[in-house]
């Protein structure tokens, strides 16, 4: 089964929209409109003569009621008679000089069915190579909107799997087909979810909630601290990072993902349990950023180790290497096991040339 999807601004640009606006992935009635939003879809071509269309699904409220009305129009040709001449249907749909009500009058000869208050409908009996629909969205007490829409074709029927006794007459066959269509739609939805379930577990296609769930599988805490783009990359590298947990390599890659800059990690010569980590200065000048950084470091810090965070001297970089500035003075060390980390009080001394 094939399908058309209406889920982006371009889909609305290719059609006609009056009294409504498309924002945040949904269609709304415009704020200054008292009545309704009217959307005329683009002309869909099934590329099959006499195509019987299968199903239409819209993302709307369950209790939308009369606030959502959808009328379907079908034709075997992309042409319609208008003012005694043949005019492409696409042109009439996109012509902004023609009002929504006038378009409904023009397309009346192609009208097939209207559904009121239904978000998921079976398009029994709607045939024609070309199809489009007109959606009326009315303002209601509760905010009324419509999100993604999907049009499935051609129609498939489970009737062909039953003995011929169930289709002895057209009337009996039509009833059984419609009845089975209800269960068939449920089955196809579940089948589609199972078929596409792998996409939910891929960092590139999963949403924020899925990414956080995958992060929990890898035992990464505080995922709310990670922006979406960085979280996506973190989950993609999670198996490798987990294998390097507690190592300098793992710490470097982990902090580079979070800060965008590779840190410099060294051991203290006098204290074997102290690790020095140099990070961009912006994480040390803001108390909130500093505390969040300490939490991130604690995720990869080996047990029993303490850390002292120092600033990277921008002028000290050479060929991608990073070093601590020679004029940086450090305060006391921070223990990753502490519940209330203290800011070490880093002071950056000005260059002598600036003092002059």
Image (cartoon, grey):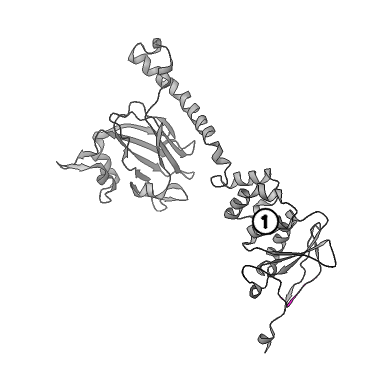
Q: Which residue shows up at 38% across the image and 37% down it? A: 69
Residue at (68% x, 83% y) in the render = 351
Residue 197 horizontal side relative to residue 72, left or right: right
Q: Residue furthest bottom?
A: 356
Instruction: Specify the farthest residue to the front.
Output: 319
Quarter holding residue 44 = top left
321 magenta-colored: yes
Q: Secondary structure at mark 1?
A: helix
Q: Is residue 269 visible?
A: yes
Q: Is residue 222 above or below residue 166?
A: below
Quadrant location of the C terminus in the rendered image: bottom right
Range of magenta residues:
320-331
- Residue 104 is left or right of residue 293, and the answer is left
Q: In the displayed structure, does residue 309 sit left or right of residue 234?
A: right
Q: Is residue 20 visible?
A: no
Question: In the depicted view, which residue is nearer to us: 153 or 217?
Answer: 217
Residue 348, percent from left and from top:
71, 77
**What residue lies at 25% left-to-right and 51% top-to-bottom?**
97
Coordinates of residue 345 in the picture (x, y in percent): 76, 71
Pointer 1 local density, CA inside 10 Å: few below 14, some 14–19, many at least 20 = many
Is the residue 349 above or below the residue 250 in the image?
below
Please check the rendered image and state whether residue 2 is part of the magenta-colored stretch, yes or no: no
> Which percent across, then down, holds residue 85?
15, 42
Which residue carries the number 1 mark? 254
Tally of marks:
1
Q: Main secondary structure of the magenta part?
A: loop
The image quarter containing residue 110 is top left
Residue 208, compared with residue 261, is above or below; it is above
The image quadrant that residue 38 belongs to is top left
Left or right of 200 in this view: 108: left
Q: Measuring from the top left, give residue 119's x and y in whole percent.
A: 44, 35
């Amino acid at each position: 089964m094939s399908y058309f999807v209406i889920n982006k601004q371009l889909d609305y640009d290719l059609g006609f929209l009056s009294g409504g606006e498309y924002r945040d992935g949904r269609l709304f009635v415009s704020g200054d409109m008292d009545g309704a939003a009217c959307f005329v879809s683009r002309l869909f071509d099934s590329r099959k003569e006499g195509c019987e269309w299968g199903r239409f699904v819209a993302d709307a409220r369950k209790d939308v009621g009369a606030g959502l009305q959808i009328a379907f129009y079908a034709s075997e040709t992309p042409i319609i008679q208008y003012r005694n001449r043949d005019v492409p249907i696409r042109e009439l749909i996109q012509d902004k000089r023609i009002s929504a009500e006038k378009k409904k009058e023009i397309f009346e000869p192609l009208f097939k069915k209207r559904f009121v208050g239904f978000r998921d409908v079976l398009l029994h009996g709607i045939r024609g190579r070309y199809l489009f629909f007109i959606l009326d969205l009315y303002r209601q007490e509760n905010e009324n909107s419509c999100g993604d829409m999907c049009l499935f074709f051609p129609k498939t029927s489970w009737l062909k799997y039953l003995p011929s006794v169930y289709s002895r007459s057209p009337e009996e066959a039509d009833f059984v087909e419609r009845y089975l269509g209800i269960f068939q739609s449920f089955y196809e939805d579940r089948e589609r979810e199972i078929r596409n379930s792998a996409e939910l577990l891929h960092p590139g296609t999963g949403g924020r909630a899925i990414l956080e769930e995958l992060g929990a599988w890898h035992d990464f805490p505080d995922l709310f601290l990670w922006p979406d783009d960085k979280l996506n990359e973190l989950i993609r590298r999670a198996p490798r990072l987990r294998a390097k947990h507690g190592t300098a390599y793992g710490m470097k890659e982990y902090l580079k993902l979070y800060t965008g800059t590779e840190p410099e990690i060294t051991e203290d010569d006098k204290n074997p349990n102290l690790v020095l980590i140099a990070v961009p200065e912006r994480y040390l000048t803001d108390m909130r950023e500093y505390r969040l950084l300490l939490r991130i470091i604690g995720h990869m810090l080996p047990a029993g180790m303490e850390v002292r965070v120092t600033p990277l001297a921008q002028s000290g970089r050479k060929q991608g290497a990073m070093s601590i500035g020679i004029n940086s003075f450090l305060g006391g060390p921070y223990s990753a096991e502490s519940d209330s980390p203290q800011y070490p009080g880093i002071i950056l001394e000005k260059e002598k040339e600036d003092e002059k």
